[in-house]
Image (spheres, coloured by chain):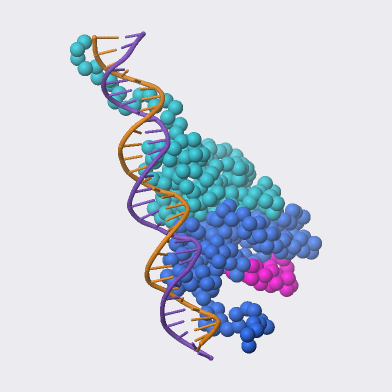
Chain colours: A cyan, B blue, C orange, D purple
Amino acid sequence: MGLKLVETSSEPKTIKRNNERPKQILSAAVELFRDRGFEATRLEDVADKAGVSKATIYLYFESKEDLFFALIREKVIPMLEQTIAQAEAFEGPASEFLRLKAQSVGRLFSHSEQGAILKLVVAEARRFPDLTEYYRTEVPERGLENIAKMIRRGINEGEFRECDAKAAATAFMFPLLMTGIWMNSVGPDEIIDPDATINFHCENFIRGLSI
Amino acid sequence: MGLKLVETSSEPKTIKRNNERPKQILSAAVELFRDRGFEATRLEDVADKAGVSKATIYLYFESKEDLFFALIREKVIPMLEQTIAQAEAFEGPASEFLRLKAQSVGRLFSHSEQGAILKLVVAEARRFPDLTEYYRTEVPERGLENIAKMIRRGINEGEFRECDAKAAATAFMFPLLMTGIWMNSVGPDEIIDPDATINFHCENFIRGLSI
DNA sequence: AGGACATGACTGACCAGTCAGTATTTTCTG
DNA sequence: CAGAAAATACTGACTGGTCAGTCATGTCCT
């Protein structure tokens, strides 16, 4: 009884509402970073938007840069993992896969946080070479390979004509990316209709690729 | 003699070697703005790169913002005028026009100052709504209409299938823009081959559009 | 002389990051 | 169970450095 009662687990056992804090802060940061750029965003505004004080940010992130890096780690990579897993599980004609992909990726980039992050990465990549290196190999590299694989399958199964699958995958993705970037920078506007653009692109792309 | 001596022309009549200054300053600014972003670029660095002092910048531009705006006015609009004029003069099949366009625009955006400016506009658009409004109506609006007109011509002449010419024009341009942006932000790298991408896109696009 | 061109040195505002201290929640003790 | 002690969560106020923009003072022409 007088002996020390040693808990088997040494880590904090209850961090109740507070493990929400990093997410709140990141969400506030995404929007402000997108609208004003990384440098022009004041950490105090991020704090206000997240409903905490500036000092609180430093409880969860080492620096302003770290906040930016966390965005990639916490929001982009998991999303990519998920869509790649979906793709691996896909059965059916490659053209159908491309249609689904265009819809889901198009929506994702045009109307969600992911588009804002994409625009942000493009805008700031040159300032953060290390992060860019990491991003390059983790995201476009893997994402494009995922599409290229499916295009090769289409070729092998006689659905698509012979072609450079890597270039085709890039040409397939670029309008989707560009639409997302547009909607998060110059747009939204009356000039670009994201759905019409993506639909046309998708169908025309498949038409061009079909035997 | 005591009377005011009013010059007939009120603008500076001799700006000898100095009418080179604004161009030098703008060229220095483009590169730094692209690499670091507008906010993070110190005007003193622009001055150093241009070989002048910071105060000299203020002889030719009202403010840092004005320097950014001048980039659009002086470098983008004239370039657009020029390519539109070329297009109007074009005789021949629409598909051939698209091929030429893809080559010239692709090169322009991937390997020249124009790509840097494009990336810069995308990165900063949200911070400068007035400029963005101006840019929107001057550049993408007119540029896309130019392409759409040519696609309509292809349709009328029985070369292309019936389709939404505006969406087609957008889908045609987006990979070219995206390639340029990529090469000026995340890239250049081993993942994206700009020439292969543009070539594939161009041929596949035309193939999809052909009757 | 006088006007155009140029600059070094300065300043006032701004902001990332720190820190000493407060509030709140959990754990310990009798 | 009270209520003290410890641990955790948070913050207001401050600081040191940075930088856009200014200005008094040149210099070099004609």
Looking at the rendered image, the quarter that the C terminus of chain B falls into is bottom right
Q: Is residue D23 above or below residue A60?
A: below
Q: Nearer the viewer, residue C20 or B67?
A: C20
Residue shown at 60%/45% (left/top)?
A110
Name the residue at 72% across, 66% down. B94
At which x and y percent is residue A184?
59, 49
Q: Is residue B209 visible?
A: yes
Question: Dividing the picture into quarters, in which one does residue A4 lie?
Answer: top left
Looking at the image, which residue sits at the far front?
Answer: B2
Which SS type dominates the magenta stretch? Answer: helix
Q: Does A1 appear above or below B12?
A: above
Q: Report the label total.
A: 0
Q: What residue sits 38% from the left and 37% below the top?
A: A59
Left or right: A134 in relation to B209: left
**Residue B94 sits inside the magenta stretch:** yes
Q: Residue farthest to the right? A: B156
Position of A119 with respect to B163 (left or right) is left
* Residue appearing at x 46%, y 36% in the figure: A52
Residue D18 position within the rendered picture, expressed as x and y whole percent measured from the top left:
39, 58
The quarter of the displayed image where residue B177 is located: bottom right
Q: Nearer the viewer, residue B180 or B32?
A: B32
Residue B41 position within the rendered picture, expressed as x and y whole percent measured from the top left: 46, 61
Res B179 seen here: no
Start-end of magenta stretch: B75-97
For the N terminus of chain B, give its image quadrant: bottom right
Foreground of the two, B55 or B5: B5
Image location of residue A115, percent across then percent down: 56, 46
Left or right? Give the position of B190 relative to B62: left
- Residue B92 in magenta? yes
